[in-house]
Amino acid sequence: MHKCNADTPEPQADATTLRRRVGELEARTAQLEAQLREAQAHQARMLENSRLQNAFFATVAHDLRTPMTSIFGYAKLVRRDFERAILPLIRSNPDAMDKARRILANLQVINAEGDRLTRLINNLLDLNKMEAGQAVWRDRPVNIADCIYEALLAVAGQFADKPDVHLRANAPRELPVVQVDPDRIAQVLVNLLHNAAKFTERGHVEISALVLESGRLEICVRDTGQGIPPEDLPRIFDLFQQACLEDTLRGVRCGTGLGLAICRQIIEHYGGHIWAESQPGQGSTFRFQLPLQGVTRP
C-alpha cells in the first residue's frame, strides 16, 4: 500500500496560495493603474496650466506695453515742448528755473523707470517662452566682437550717470564668427553689464573675450563692485534668486532674479556654461563659455 509523505503539500493548499497571490497581483495592478491615471491627469493639468500661463503672460505683456508706449511718447513730447516753449521764457527767473530743472529731472525718472519696467516685462516673456520651448532662435553667422561693442553702446547711458566708474573693453576684432542669435547673445552681455553697473560705485567694469586652448570662446565681465556673498554664488542663476549686499544708505535694489536665469537659459541652449566668481567687497567676475563647433574665422 502506498503511503503519503507528510511533507508533501496538499493540492488544496497550493490552490489557496495561488489564489491569494493572484489576488495580490490583481490588487497591485489596480493600484498601479490608478497611479497611472492620476499621473496622466496631473500631467494634463500641468499642460493646461502651462497653456494658461503662456496666454496670461502674453495678455499682460500686451496690456502693459500699450500704455507704456503712450507714457514714453507723451513724456518725450512734454520734454520737447517744455524745452522749446517754456525754458526760453523763464531763463531770467532763478526760482522758475529751479522748478524747471526739477520737472526735467522728473521726466528723466519717468523714462528710466519705464525702461526698467519694459525690461522686466520682456524678461518675463522671454523666460516663459524658453521654459515652454517656444522661444524663437534666429541663428546666423555673428561676429562676437560686434556683439560686444554694440552691448557697450547699449549700456553707455547707465555708466554716464556714474562718473567714478569706467567702462572698458578688451576684445580683439578678430574673434571667431559664431552661429548664434545675435539678439540673444546681446541680451546676455547687456544683462551682465547692467548688473555690474548697478552694483559698482567706483572703479571699473571691463568686458573681455578670448579663445581658449580648449577651443571654446570665453567672455568675462569684471567689476570692482560690492561683490557677492559666497553662500549666494551657487544659486544666483536660479529663477527668482538674487544676491547683493544690502546698503540702506544708497537703497541698492537686488532686482527680480530673472536676468541671470535668462542668461543661463541662453548660454546652455548653445551648449555653453556660465558662472560667477566673487568675494564681498572685492568685485565680481561673470564668465561664460561657448563651444566653437561649426564656426568660421573672419
Image (cartoon, grey):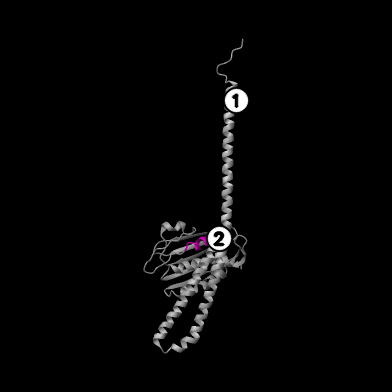
Q: Which numbered circle lies on residue 102?
A: none
Q: Is residue 179 left or right of residue 278?
A: right
6 up-or-down from 80: above or below: above
30 up-or-down from 165: above or below: above
Q: Position of residue 59 (x, y in %)?
A: 57, 64
Q: Is residue 57 left or right of residue 282?
A: right
Q: Which residues are magenta?
A: 256-265
Q: Which residue is mark 2?
A: 128
Circles 1 and 2, Cβ within 8 Å, touching? The answer is: no
Q: Residue at x 53, y 70 (%)?
A: 151
Q: Residue at x 39, y 85 (%)?
A: 95
Q: Residue at x 57, y 45 (%)?
A: 38
Amino acid type for the residue under numbered disc 1: Ala
Q: Residue at x 45, y 77 (%)?
A: 106
87 up-or-down from 163: above or below: below
173 up-or-down from 129: above or below: below
Q: Which residue is mark 1?
A: 15
